[in-house]
Image (tube, coloured by chain):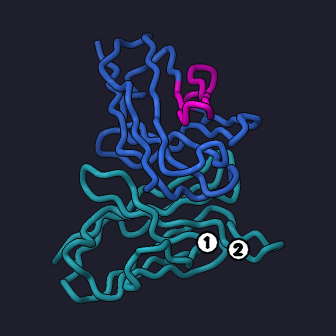
Amino acid sequence: EVQLVESGGGLVQPGGSLRLSCAASGFTFSSYSMNWVRQAPGVGLEWVSYISSSTGTIYYADSVKGRFTISRDNAKNSLYLHMNSLRAEDTAVYYCARATTTSSSHFDYWGQGALVTVSS
Amino acid sequence: DIVMTQSPDSLAVSLGERATMNCKSSQSVLYRSNNKNYLAWYQQKPGQPPKLLIYWASTRESGVPDRFSGSGSGTDFTLTISSLQAEDVAVYYCQQYYSTPPITFGQGTRLEIK
């Protein structure tokens, strides 16, 4: 069974940093591209970042470019999102999501999400 | 960026009746070389992550009931639930993955029971 489990969320002050993790199981993690998608309270879905299976290709939404860094460790079956210079508008549930192929792909599995709250 | 616009924002349908919602993209998401529309539909119930229902505009994901169907091409798409069940109450999102980055989602259609 495919499972994606996020961790690392929490309360952080504006300007602070946080690292989210996504532990994958039930599939060959190294064969799949992965994404982070976020959802602010009561709002819709916003794609945040993409990383290819081999880490050779990485993309970011303009809203997080220069502040967030996506990475993965295929040996540990884990995906990460390093978030710096956090702002109130980054408050959201962050989901990791598996892409079926490349960056031009729908997402067939999602984690349960990790809540990040940016507030003083 | 491709802007995805869903309509209506909310929809109330009686149990057993048909529910229809729409998604319009600001430019075509049809890739002519493979004749595929890079359009997916997701269902999100309260407190849960999104669940993939439909991809390539009309291909039902494994395990999704056949009352869910997707149609359309180019810039205009429709998700239809043929006979609404109580468990279908959710917010439905469309997503384009034709022009990336960024992948973009519609704002969602909230489906309720009348």
**Could you tell me which secondary element the residue under label 2 belongs to?**
strand
Residue, disc 1 = B56
> At label 1, which amino acid type do we have?
Trp
**B42 lies above or below A47:** below
Residue, disc 2 = B36
Residue B37, how many percent across, how many down?
66, 71
Q: Residue furthest left?
A: B114
In the image, which disc is placed on residue A30?
none
Q: Pointers 2 and 1 in contact (CB under 8 A)?
A: yes
Q: From mark 2 to mark 1, how far is it between C-alphas?
A: 6 Å
Q: Please say whether residue A51 is one of the residues in the magenta stretch.
A: no
| Chain drawn cyan in the picture | B
Give the residues drawn in magenta, as a range.
A63-81
Chain A colour is blue
Q: Is residue A72 visible?
A: no
**B53 lies above or below A93:** below
**Residue at coordinates 42% horizontally, 28% vertically from top-left?**
A90
Q: How many marks?
A: 2
**B57 lies above or below A108:** below
Q: Is residue A113 left or right of residue B38?
A: left
Question: Mark 2 or mark 1, which has the lower sequence index?
Answer: 2
**Residue at coordinates 58% horizontally, 59% vertically from top-left?**
A106
